[in-house]
Image: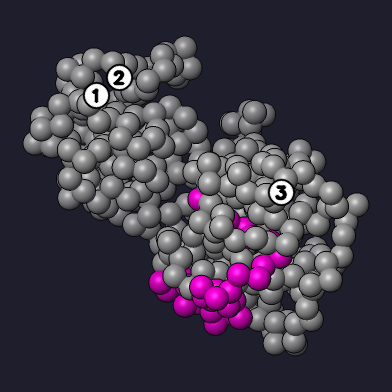
Amino acid sequence: MLVFSSNRRKLGGDMNAHVANLKSYLAEHYEAAEWPTLLEQAEQWQQTRPLAGLRILDATPVFHNTLAKYLALLSAGAELFIPARPAICDPAALQLARTFGIRAAGKQDTDFDIILDCAGQFNRLHPTLGFCELTRSGVARLERVHHPVFVADDGRIKRIETILGTGDGFFRALEQLGYGEVAGKALLVVGYGKVGRGVVLHAQQRGMRITVADVRDVRDELPTGVRYCGMDDPAELTKVMVSAWCVVTCSGRINALRRRMDASAVHNSATLLANLGVEDEYGADISPERVLNRKIPLNFILEEPTAMRYIETTMALHNACALELLTADLPHRLMPPPADVEARLLHTAATRGVIGKEIGRLGSLN
């Protein structure tokens, strides 16, 4: 059952012009097969306008391809706000967003119907309908709020972004820094979750010699030819780190390597150090200057940290969860995305997107 919010407001004709202009702009920069789910979402929602007049705050990191996410929400009739000073953004993309009628939310702006959050930044606000959280890192901040909370990261779709997209972004960032020739070089991947698996997948395609380090014994999960290093023996882990061409941390845990390595030996080695997690996984004994991009996720040096083809389905899912908040009598707790919503989006991405074959390689995405 859907409910109609009495807080809905009518928007002026200028918004229709912004939608048309933004759609034309995106069509000049992306092929339709690069963003099939967001494009379909925008076209359908422009007809049905399911979010007409609702005030929505979207805290998604602002990059060029985020504009396609905004297109769908504006097409749905939302009065869309983004943080005045986003935690993660490309300033040029932020300026572009504002030219298309997307408003900056200041500290005084707290009256929202829906918050599309990222990392639980706005957990202290009280939207009338609830939250949709984009990342795993926001779960701890939102698990105690007294609102319905849909968590996009709990779905199958997020694996497209994290396994295929982040791995791709890591190697595009290395190439941008002049490290494009990686065949035959030794790579240590710390953490074998979704991001770590993606790095391993792309490293294999590039002919690298790969070792995975994890606090779990993941040997039975590793592809053929990938070595395993436990993390309980600092001397052994340090040996692998200093002999690698590059180490990349993907565990998502703060201080994941602290006290598990000889920090001085690693710091003084020739090994490239990189991070793909939101936390400082190296710890204070390794200075920010010693790690590429000062410990900030390496793919964030790119204009598009995750290429449109890999992130657009995640952004469409985040948007789609906003519609689920219109359902009456939702429980005030964390919830995964509805399976039928994910299934529809996955079908569109697999049948109309350029990544259809790559999605197939992820199997059922379970």
Whole-angstrom CA distance, mark 2 to mark 1, is: 6 Å
- Sequence-first disc among 3 and 2: 3
Let me know if residue 115 is in the magenta part.
Answer: yes
Q: How crowded is mark 1: few (under 14 residues within 10 Å), some or many (20 or more)?
A: some
Q: What element carries label 3?
A: loop
Let me know if residue 173 is in the magenta part.
Answer: no
Whole-angstrom CA distance, mark 3 to mark 2, is: 38 Å
Do we see residue 309 in this rendering? no
Amino acid tagged 3 = Pro
- Find residue 209 and report its horizontal and vertical position in percent: 30, 25
Q: Mark 1 — residue?
A: 260
Q: Are marks 2 and 1 in contact (CB under 8 Å)?
A: yes
Residue furthest to the right = 1
Residue for point 37% across, 22% down: 214
Quarter holding residue 270: top left
Q: Give the range drawn in magenta.
A: 91-119
Residue for point 58% across, 47% down: 142
Which circle marks residue 148 in the picture?
A: 3
Residue for point 80% across, 47% down: 330
- Find residue 107 and report its horizontal and vertical position in percent: 51, 73
Q: Could you tell whether 289 is left or right of 227 in the image?
A: left
Q: Mark 2 — residue?
A: 231
